[in-house]
Image (cartoon, rainbow, N blue to C red):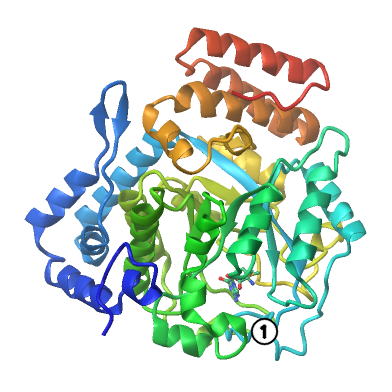
Amino acid sequence: MAEYNVKSLKAEEFINDGEIRATLEYAEANKNNIELIDAILEKARPKKNGNGLECKGLTHREASVLLACEIPEKIEEMKKIAEEIKLAFYGNRIVMFAPLYLSNYCVNGCVYCPYHLKNKTICRKKLSQEEIKAEVIALQDMGHKRLALEAGEDPVHNPIEYILESIKTIYSIKHKNGAIRRVNVNIAATTVENYRKLKEAGIGTYILFQETYHKESYLQLHPTGPKHDYDYHTEAMDRAMEGGIDDVGLGVLFGLELYKYEFAGLLMHAEHLEAVHGVGPHTISVPRLKRADDIDPDQFDNGIDDETFKKIIACIRLAVPYTGMIISTRESEKVRGEALNMGISQISGASRTSVGGYTEEERPHDSEQFDVSDQRTLDEVVRWLMETGHIPSFCTACYREGRTGDRFMSLCKSGQILNCCHPNALMTLTEYLVDYATPETQAVGFALIEKELEKIPGEKVKAIAKQNIEDIKNSNRRDFRF
Ligand code: SAM
């Protein structure tokens, strides 16, 4: 039997089944232990430290006690602290992105995914470089600056060379005032050498969802293909970091296994990355299983309701306060709106999950990866965010200024976010409003920006930001950043 060891590079030791089971037992035994719950909540609360605020985060055991707790007032308190943490480190900014599906050819047998090899009804597509250009222009014309590339695993159709060439194509397209300034990549687990190539191609975050941390279920859910190898998949982030990628994005597909098990596994993975590489995950995504071609989510027993889903998000926020959290258009406007206040810092907008979907007039369904719940346009999402007290941000500055990995975390902890991320968000939002927004959205946005500029504490930074915003409004000068 494998022993738990957070620093081990072996999947079964850092995501240790025995430790997860012991954690779940401990959480169950303490779920009504008010004294302990209060102490954990107190530990999670942001505290003053010099000029800024600091958070200690929680261990997987502590966070699991909160997740197990069913006392309504305590759950409310978790959500309140989650919001405090979010405002302390991320402010009211929400980073915007869109997925770009390159190819749905796949050799794996994942039983929950419509790309699975045996699915003969889905229309298989792979974008050519010309088609990628057209998709990227469509995305730029909406106002997107940040993409997440998605592809099935297929060494013949989608080899690493295809992914690298596609990244090069995407960064090279300059259309009107548009530009994709950060390309994140969500492709199957690969080798250190390939991760190095992705790093050299200038990717932002490497995202790979674990799907489930429960090994036995994992093996059944991925019966065939290279993804069947649980250890290779689970150890992928260590290889990515060895290859020089220091922003990695974790996630589980909620609905496949029991959520408490997944939650503990996810936090143990984050603790492992921190212990071994000195930096935790850059982001955590919280996808829930959706209906798709040949996939009926009701076949899976472990679906979670909206209340549980929100509680999970709040508990993740408490446990890893400096990690960005992403929610996609798998979720409805209502759920996304509520989740934003519990710690989400990035959302996708106007997503099409079909290969080549952005160049189609009507939303196509024939090659889709999953049903999109939130089908609003980017303009609608941006306006909605602003009207509900958020600042949509198209900023990509950190990654382009080399503030990745622990350097990003230091910025987060330094209290300088209001002098850096806040003006960057306002400047990139101005770009969006000037170049792409409808007059209604512009009106809401410009009023918001004027108000938000006053929150910049540094007088010099404030003056520069105001000047840059005027320049964006009155010229074609773009891409200002701190
Ligand atoms: N092929 C890559 C891999 O193996 O990790 C990643 C790309 S896949 C397009 C992105 C993610 O979509 C998967 O990791 C999975 O979590 C999610 N996904 C698959 N089927 C889904 C479904 N029916 N509903 C919601 N999300 C799904």
Above or below — where is 462 with respect to 198? above
* 36 or 12: nearer the viewer: 12
Label 1, residues with CA under 10 Å away: few <14, some 14-19, many ≥20 = many
Q: Secondary structure at mark 1?
A: loop
Residue pictured at 47% horizontal, 62% vertical: 238
- From the top left corner, tell me how far across and down residue 173 is, in percent: 85, 44
- From the top left corner, tell me how far across and down residue 467 is, in percent: 67, 11
- From the top left corner, tell me how far across and down residue 391 is, in percent: 56, 34
Residue sticking out furthest to the right: 130
**To which residue does mark 1 refer?**
116
Above or below — where is 455 with respect to 64? above
- From the top left corner, tell me how far across and down residue 458 is, in percent: 47, 12
* 442 or 398: nearer the viewer: 398
Which amino acid, mark 1? Answer: His
Marker count (numbered): 1
Res. 286 in view: no
* 164 or 379: nearer the viewer: 164
Q: Is residue 364 left or right of residue 191?
A: right
Q: Dividing the image into 4 quarters, which one contains the N terminus?
A: bottom left
Q: Is residue 73 left or right of residue 214?
A: left
Residue pictured at 61% horizontal, 69% vertical: 190
Query: Would you identify the image quadrant in which residue 370 lies?
Result: bottom right
Quarter, ligand 1: bottom right
